Amino acid sequence: MRSSLEEADPAAAPTPAPAQAAPASIATLQESYCKLCSEKSQNINPFILCVLQKVDEEIKKGPKEGITLSIAGNNRLIPVQKVTAEDFCILSKLLKDNPYINGLDVRYNLINDIGAHYAAKLLQKQLYLIYLNLMFNDIGPEGGELLAKALHKNTTLKYLRMTGNKIENKGGMVFAAMLQINSSLEKLDVGDCDLGMQSVVAFATVLTQNQAIKGINLNRPILYGEQEESTVHLGHMLKENHCLVELHMCKHGIKNCGFHQLCNALYLNSSLRYLDVSCNKITRDGMVYLADVLKTNATLEVIDLSFNRIENAGANYLSESLTSHNRSLKALSVVSNNIEGEGLVALSQSMKTNPTLSHIYIWGNKFDEATCVAYSDLIQKDRLKPENTDVEPFVVDGHVYLAEVSNGLKKHYYWTPTYGDAYGHSSNSGFALVPIQPKEPAIQVQQ
């Protein structure tokens, strides 16, 4: 059985404070937790207790550079009793002075705005925490405001995930204002948070000045109108910002005109390495602009165009640039783009002359036999590693077909698998190719 304890990758995360000898008060987290529950007359959460037992076992083995405590409410391998706001109150008191814990993952629980109050207090007092995952915890605008204000003085936290908490425009504005003050946060995920246009524009404005943020996720804001204002403002930001490495703009309603604005900015930007414009309305005409950018841009390494509509013509434009000009792009996803055999084969041909492009994802398009043969040939000749694509060839009655495999740029963004490595390169190649310091835990402790 796999435990819910995950250990952070020392090579990927900033070096935390040196490990210390375990003080008597935290020598056994289980005992401390039970004692706190007794003092507060609160029932013990067996899931939390089970996780703390694994932490104690790890601490006893010797000093650790940093442990991420994972109490994810969507764990399907062991019995889960979701963490409530009251549970998180006890947990925050337990972790307040713990030098071993530098990451906390409490995704998919029931923390809500009351628990966000305790999370804010934890951020004010815990001097070792560099990673906090609060995704999908029913936190609203009030809880978001508390967390953002706590980060005004916090100088430790590097990565915050607020994914799926409906902090709305009000909470988004407070987070944007926080980035004017905080200079230590390196990665912020406010995707699926119901941000409004006002807060998206505020983030774009603040990021023209903020020199600390390396990665930001602004997926699925609630936008009204067809003027593509978010794309215009974020394009302007990319012209001014030379620190941002990773930008996610999924479900922004981007059309060709707005994509043109982004591409114009990329001529002047020399830092962005990962661009995610999946689930938008970009067509083959938009690929004319991107193909032209790729002829001169030597920075972009990962581009996610999944769930647009670039068709054969768009794939051909990209193929031409990748064949003759670009030598920096490492990964390209064109999943579900209404591309037929001609365009897919053209992309496969570009890999024969382009030594840098190593990852390509094509599932959801219209495969013909030429496509199946082309990608089977790339895999058999070891030009395309099986773990670096989302298709696998098989033969039936002498004909080659392609089956889907579970690889991708960010396969486990919302969920974790029931087996295997949730943070492996094959299922999260975008994050692996363009690591942002710090990244999520990479090693799972088995039991």
Image (cartoon, rainbow, N blue to C red):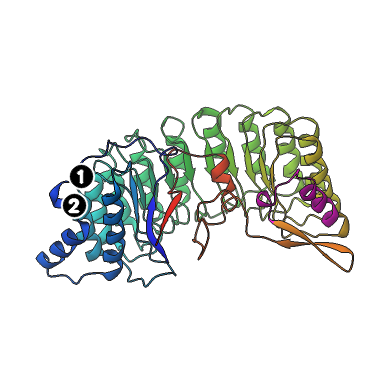
Residue 273's place in the image compared with 363, above or below, is above
Which of 236 and 442 lies nearest the eye of the viewer?
A: 442
- Residue at horizontal 13 percent and vertical 63 percent from the top: 35
What's the magenta bit mostly, secondary-structure-wise?
Answer: helix
Is residue 300 within the magenta segment? no
Of labels 2 and 1, earlier in sequence is 2
Q: Which residues are magenta?
A: 371-390
Mark 2, other Cα within 10 Å: few <14 / some 14–19 / many ≥20: some
Amino acid beneath label 1: Lys
Q: Is residue 229 visible?
A: no
Which numbered disc covers residue 24? Answer: none
Mark 1 — residue? 125
The residue furthest left is 39
Which of 235 and 333 lies nearest the eye of the viewer?
A: 333
- Residue at horizontal 53 percent and vertical 57 percent from the top: 412
Separation of marks 2 and 1 at Cα, in angstroms = 20 Å
Front disc: 2 or 1 = 2
Amino acid beneath label 2: Ala
Mark 2 — residue? 27
Q: Quadrant of the N terminus?
A: bottom left
Mark 1, other Cα within 10 Å: few <14 / some 14–19 / many ≥20: some
Is residue 387 within the magenta segment? yes
Which of 387 and 200 lies nearest the eye of the viewer?
A: 387
Which of 303 and 390 lies nearest the eye of the viewer?
A: 390
Q: Quadrant of the C terminus?
A: bottom left
Q: Secondary structure at mark 2?
A: loop
- Position of residue 216 measured from the top left corner of the image (x, y, whole percent): 47, 43
- Position of residue 377 measured from the top left corner of the image (x, y, whole percent): 82, 50
Q: Secondary structure at mark 1?
A: helix
